[in-house]
Amino acid sequence: FTSFIHPHPPFAPPSPWHKLYRAAQMPPPKLPPHAEDLQLYINKYQNRYKYRDNGWDLNLVRTMKAFYYACISFIDFQIGRILEALEETGQLDNTIIIFTSDHGEHLGDYRCFGKRSMHDSAARIPLLVRYPRQFPAGHKVDTPVSLVDIYPTILEATGVDERPPHLDGMPFQEIVSSGLSTRTVYSQFQSGPQAVYMLRSEHYKYIYSTPDNREILFHVDIDPEETHDLAGVPQYRRKLEEYRAMLMERTGLEIPARNHTPPKTPANPDDGLLVQDPPGFRMDGVPPEYLIGI
C-alpha cells in the first residue's frame, strides 16, 4: 500500500514536471451562467477563503489547473516505477493493483474550489483495478461503484470467506461477472447540521444538503456537466420523490427538515481557520522544533 499527497493544495509540482503544462493550454472551468445557484452551503463556506481574496482570476485558475495536471503526471511517474519493480521481480501478475483517490477538486468549476461537494468535479474519482486472475484486461464498467466496494473486493480476491455480516459494498468481481448495470450508490460528507448526501444511479444524481435544507436532481445522461437542477421541474417530481424516499430509508433523515435554521457563513473570512495561542501561553523552555512544526 502506498499513498501520495499530490495532487493536493498547494499545487507545487517538483522540477521538471512543473514545466509540462502551460496555463494558456488549460481548458477553462465549467462556468454555467447560473453557477452561483448550484453552490451549496459547503461550497460557499470554503469559497470564502480559497483563492478569492482578490476576485475571480481566470488566468490564476488555469495556472492552478496546469500545476494540478503536473502533480498528477509526477504521481503517474512514481506509480510507473512501482509497476516496473513488480514486473522485474516477477510479482506483477500476482499483485492486486487498485489505483484510486479519496476526492476530486473543483479547480474553479461552478466558481468553486476545494472538495467536499457532490458535484462530479469533487466527488467523482479515478478507479483502475488490475489482477489478471480475476479481471479481464481492458474491461470498462459503467455501473456506479464506490470506495466502499474496495474492501469486499480485496476479501474476494484473497479468498477470505469469513466476512462481516453487514458490508455496504459489493465486490468488483461480482459487478464485472454479472454484467450488473442497475445499481445505486450513496455518498456522505460529515453528519449532523452540515452534512451533504448523494445518491447516484445509472441515470440520475440526487443531492441533499442539510444546512441548506435543499435537494438537487441531475439527469446525468442528458446533462453530464451537471448544470440544470431538475428538483423543481414538475415532470421530474416522481423521480425526486423516489430518490428522496430511498435516502430517507437509508439514513433516517427527515427531508425536508422541519424547523430548519440555516447556519450563517462567518463574516470574517478567517473565522475558524487560525489556530491561535491560548491565553497565558509562554515560549520559555519550548523546543524550537515544536515551534516550527518539525
Image (cartoon, rainbow, N blue to C red):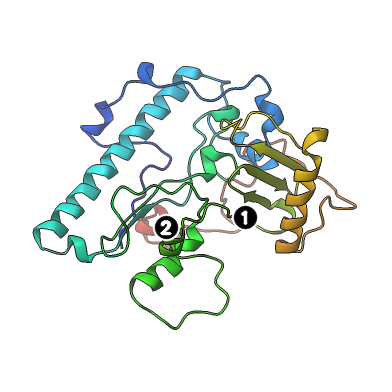
Rendering coords of residue 83 (x, y %):
19, 53
Q: What residue is at 49 percent from the left and 18 percent from the top? A: 58
**Crowding near pointer 1: few (<14 within 10 Å), some, many (20+)?**
some
Residue 19 appears left or right of 199 = left
Check disc 1 and report the residue beneath it.
Answer: 188
Quickly name the residue at label 2.
176
Residue 151 placed where, x, y %?
Answer: 44, 67
Q: Judge left or right: residue 144 versus residue 135.
A: right
Q: In what quadrant of the picture does the N terminus appear?
A: bottom left
Q: Secondary structure at mark 1?
A: strand
Residue 160, by quadrant, is bottom left
In the picture provided, is 80 more to the left or to the right than 75? left
Which residue lies at the image location 52% right of the left edge and 79% below the top edge?
Answer: 164
Q: Nearer the viewer, residue 254 or 114?
A: 254
Secondary structure under tag 2 reads helix
Res 241 seen here: yes
Q: Quadrant of residue 281?
A: bottom right
Name the amino acid, label 1.
Answer: Gln
Q: Amino acid at mark 2?
A: Val
Does residue 114 appear in this view? Answer: no
